[in-house]
């Protein structure tokens, strides 16, 4: 399979506080993964785990402290923001569509602006045809958006409009950062199915970033689970989520409610430390909450091992 995007040992460090009492927070810690052509790759984990920081680095909004982000095998250089947007190969769909669009501006202007900026058409008629084609791919048409403001659309419609705008440049990779979290539950599956249709019709790849394991399981081919800047497990979505190897994924699965009154919650939950404490922990980031914690977990960072084809960062498998 062709690799569309590859992260090689990427790290991002932020410094917080004054010059006298500065804290060094490693938001992304030596992360490596790749996304294949026509694949939905999931990046999941709780808030603050570093997944959105990875998206910002891929899009060029942040520079990696170290490591490489390689797009379509280009020279092994980090993907600079200007390069990504100039080649138009990487586009983004963000969490809240109502924050994506200016409420005082008609949405059609965003489409014409994109066509103009990327020089996608030589005439108004050609621009209209290209815009209508992108909208048709998400089940809409130019007539349905013409002259309308963002407030005149439902959340699901506006997210489809946002996806259509990202398709104008015929990208090879979509970065979808929590694309259904602000959409009604009844509409989530339709947007999930839309991503699958885009893969089948256009061969686009998707980096699907989420904290919702249910939608990740439904739509993803492979998935990586992050905790405090680290990928703790990665592999085929079925093996990672249905047969969890890492204790953190076991905990995440237990948090998904089941509609069965006979199954009562019996597990004693260990509350998390503060984000700062977990980020600054020397050993395993999950040691403060893990039911299988050992003394070495508090002193040493576990290495990556492979169990049944799944990457697991845990001493239980050494």
Image (cartoon, rainbow, N blue to C red):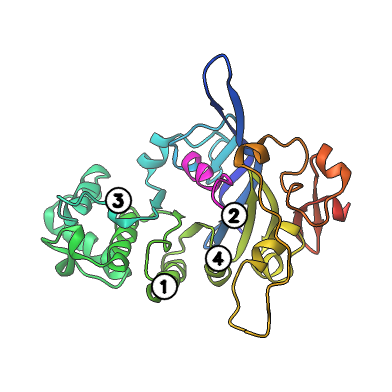
> Residue 107 location, x and y as percent?
19, 56
How far is the residue under mark 4 from the one under mark 3? 23 Å
Q: Nearer the viewer, residue 174 or 87?
A: 174
Quadrant assignment, res 147: bottom left
**Which residue is disc 4 drawn over?**
216
Q: Which residue is mark 2?
A: 45
Q: Which residues are magenta?
A: 46-57
Q: Is residue 55 left or right of residue 163?
A: right
Question: What element does badge 3 sit on?
Answer: helix
- For mark 1, what is the residue? 185
Most foreground residue, 208 or 46: 46
Q: x%, y% of residue 227?
A: 65, 48
* Residue bearing mark 3: 99
Between discs 2 and 1, the one toward the N terminus = 2
Dot 2 falls on a residue whose secondary structure is loop
Q: Look at discs 4 and 3 and give the one toward the viewer.
A: 3
How far is the residue under mark 3 from the one under mark 1?
Answer: 19 Å
**Residue at (52, 63) in percent of width and height:** 38
Q: CA distance from mark 2 to mark 1?
A: 20 Å
Dot 2 and dot 1 residues touching (CB under 8 Å): no
Q: Residue at x 56, y 59 (%)?
A: 41
User: Looking at the image, which residue sits at the far top?
Assistant: 20
Answer with mark 3 or mark 1, whichever residue precedes in sequence: 3
Q: Earlier in the sequence, mark 3 or mark 2?
A: 2
Q: Contact, CB < 8 Å: mark 4 with mark 1?
A: no
Q: Please state the horizontal and vertical placement of residue 273, each as a whole percent of the image.
A: 66, 44
Measured as percent of width and height from the top left, residue 173 is found at 46, 54
């Amino acid at each position: 399979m062709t690799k569309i995007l590859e992260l090689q040992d990427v790290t991002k460090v932020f410094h917080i506080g004054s010059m006298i009492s500065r804290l060094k927070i490693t938001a992304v810690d030596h992360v490596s993964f790749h996304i294949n052509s026509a694949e939905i790759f999931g990046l999941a984990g709780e808030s603050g785990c570093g997944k959105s920081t990875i998206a910002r680095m891929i899009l060029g909004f942040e520079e990696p402290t170290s490591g490489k982000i390689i797009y379509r095998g280009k020279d092994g250089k980090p993907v600079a923001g200007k390069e990504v947007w100039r080649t138009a190969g990487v586009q983004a769909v963000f969490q809240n569509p109502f924050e994506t669009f200016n409420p005082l501006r008609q949405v059609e202007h965003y489409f014409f602006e994109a066509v103009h900026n990327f020089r996608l058409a030589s005439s108004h008629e050609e621009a209209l045809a290209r815009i209508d084609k992108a909208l048709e791919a998400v089940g809409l048409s130019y007539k349905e958006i013409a002259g309308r403001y963002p407030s005149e659309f439902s959340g699901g419609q506006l997210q489809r409009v946002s996806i259509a705008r990202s398709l104008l440049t015929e990208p090879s990779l979509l970065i979808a950062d929590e694309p259904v979290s602000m959409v009604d539950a009844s509409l989530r599956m339709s947007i999930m199915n839309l991503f699958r249709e885009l893969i089948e019709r256009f061969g686009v790849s998707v980096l699907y970033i989420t904290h919702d394991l249910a939608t990740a399981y439904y739509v993803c081919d492979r998935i990586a689970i992050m905790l405090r800047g680290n990928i703790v497990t990665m592999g085929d979505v079925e093996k990672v989520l249905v047969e969890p190897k890492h204790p953190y994924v076991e905990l995440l699965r237990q948090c998904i409610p089941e509609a069965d009154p006979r199954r009562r919650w019996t597990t004693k939950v260990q509350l998390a430390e503060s984000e700062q404490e977990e980020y600054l922990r020397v050993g395993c980031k999950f040691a403060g909450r893990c039911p299988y914690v050992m003394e070495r977990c508090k002193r040493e960072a576990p290495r990556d091992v492979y169990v049944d084809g799944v990457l697991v960062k845990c001493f239980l498998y050494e």
